[in-house]
Amino acid sequence: MLVELLLVVAIIAVLMFITILAITPQRNLSHARNAQRRIDTQTISNAIYQYLIDKHPLPSTIPSGSFKQICKTGVTGALCGDGVDLSVVTTGGMYVPSMPVDPQAPVSGTGTNYWILLDSINRLIVDAPNAEEGEYIFVRK
């Protein structure tokens, strides 16, 4: 009798666990997108610093004072508009093969949905402002 009761409780627990997983796929997807954003911001930051080590000055297009959106790979000059052209770190794939793009960035847009800034003490900040679940994702070096 006790074994049967424990078996029923275990089966109910497993079914509840499966139900919770089935109900919260959106949360799981949000976590996955945020993980990608953390990787992307780190990748952008690392590519810029590798460029700095090789060429010495930071790319002159990096703004100071206020954040600007980084343009997608292949979007340069006038097409980039008010965005930040970092094609110097993607050209030839030496530092990064292509500029990472936020998982929810519009396909037709020119921006990556990642923003960049040199702060008042010349630290590079790469920001992912569209992070979900109340997270704030950025890299500051």
Image: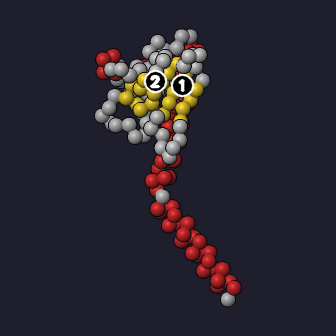
Mark closer to the chain start, 1 or 2: 2
Q: Amino acid at mark 2?
A: Phe
User: Pointers 1 and 2 in contact (CB under 8 A)?
Assistant: yes
Q: Nearer the viewer, residue 64 or 20?
A: 64
- Secondary structure of the residue carrying numbered label 1: strand
As drawn, 35 above or below 64: below
Q: Nearer the viewer, residue 97 or 67?
A: 67
- Secondary structure of the residue carrying numbered label 2: loop
Q: Residue at x 58, y 75 (%)?
A: 11
Q: Position of residue 41 (x, y in %)?
A: 52, 31
Q: Alpha-carbon distance for marks 1 and 2?
A: 9 Å
* Crowding near the residue tagged with mark 1, few <14, some 14–19, many ≥20 C-alpha atoms within 10 Å: some
Q: Residue at x 54, y 69 (%)?
A: 16
Q: How many marks?
A: 2
Q: Residue at x 57, y 70 (%)?
A: 14
Report the side of 10 relative to 105 (left or right).
Answer: right
* Crowding near the residue tagged with mark 2, few <14, some 14–19, many ≥20 C-alpha atoms within 10 Å: some
Task: Provide the residue designation for mark 1.
Answer: 125
The dot on residue 67 is 2
Q: Position of residue 38 (x, y in %)?
A: 54, 37
Which quarter of the picture shows residue 76? top left
The dot on residue 74 is none
